[in-house]
Image (spheres, helix red, strand yellow):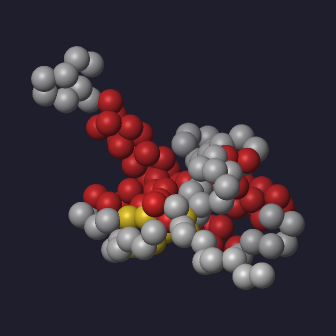
């Protein structure tokens, strides 16, 4: 006995997007926002649900150098230890060096989003 082909639900039918982002962690979502701000249509492909990401499971959120008394080299060393030999030192160093600027971007985006729109109450 053969079954008729399944019809995909309306949400799964073919659609066209300029960019497909695979992953809904902080990296994927940040990239999707930047691309969308350039006027491109974006689809995000994720696991079972949007909260099912390594970012969401991370222990303690964002670790970034924010004070003059903090140390980039110590952050690199800590990350390499936590990565148990799986991290590329050059990539880790670049990400940690870029960290303060990325956090400033996140806060700037949040401030823009929280500004009241004309004609709306805050």
The percent coordinates of residue 82 (x first, y second) are 82, 58
Q: In which quarter of the image is the N terminus?
A: bottom right
Observer-nearest residue: 107 or 28? 28
Residue 28 seen in the figure: no
Q: Horizontally, is 121 left or right of 30 in the view? A: left
Compared to residue 119, the image places residue 110 above or below, namely below
Q: In which quarter of the image is the C terminus?
A: top left
The percent coordinates of residue 19 (x first, y second) are 39, 72
Q: Horizontally, is 12 left or right of 3 in the view? A: left
Residue at the (40%, 49%) spot, across then down: 105
Q: Which residue appears farthest toward the left when viewing the image? A: 119
Q: In which quarter of the image is residue 14?
A: bottom left
Q: Which residue appears farthest toward the bottom when viewing the image? A: 2
Compared to residue 21, the image places residue 67 above or below, namely above
Q: Horizontally, is 15 left or right of 91 in the view? A: left
Observer-nearest residue: 86 or 77? 86
Residue at the (36%, 43%) spot, across then down: 109
Q: Which residue appears farthest toward the right when viewing the image? A: 84
Residue at the (60%, 72%) spot, across then down: 6
The percent coordinates of residue 28 (x first, y second) are 52, 62
Compared to residue 96, the image places residue 2 above or below, namely below
The percent coordinates of residue 31 (x first, y second) are 44, 63
Q: In which quarter of the image is residue 38?
A: bottom left
Observer-nearest residue: 110 or 2? 2
Q: Horizontally, is 45 left or right of 117 in the view? A: right
Residue at the (19%, 29%) spot, across then down: 117
Residue 84 seen in the figure: yes
């Amino acid at each position: 006995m053969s079954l008729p082909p399944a019809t995909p639900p309306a949400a799964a039918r073919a659609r066209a997007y300029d960019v497909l982002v695979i992953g809904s962690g902080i990296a994927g979502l940040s990239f999707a926002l930047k691309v969308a701000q350039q006027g491109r249509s974006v689809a995000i492909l994720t696991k079972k649900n949007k909260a099912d990401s390594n970012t969401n499971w991370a222990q303690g959120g964002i670790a970034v150098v924010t004070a003059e008394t903090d140390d980039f080299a110590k952050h690199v060393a800590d990350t390499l230890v936590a990565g148990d030999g799986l991290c590329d030192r050059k990539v880790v160093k670049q990400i940690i060096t870029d960290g303060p600027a990325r956090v400033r971007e996140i806060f700037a985006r949040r401030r823009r989003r929280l500004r009241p729109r004309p004609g709306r109450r805050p």
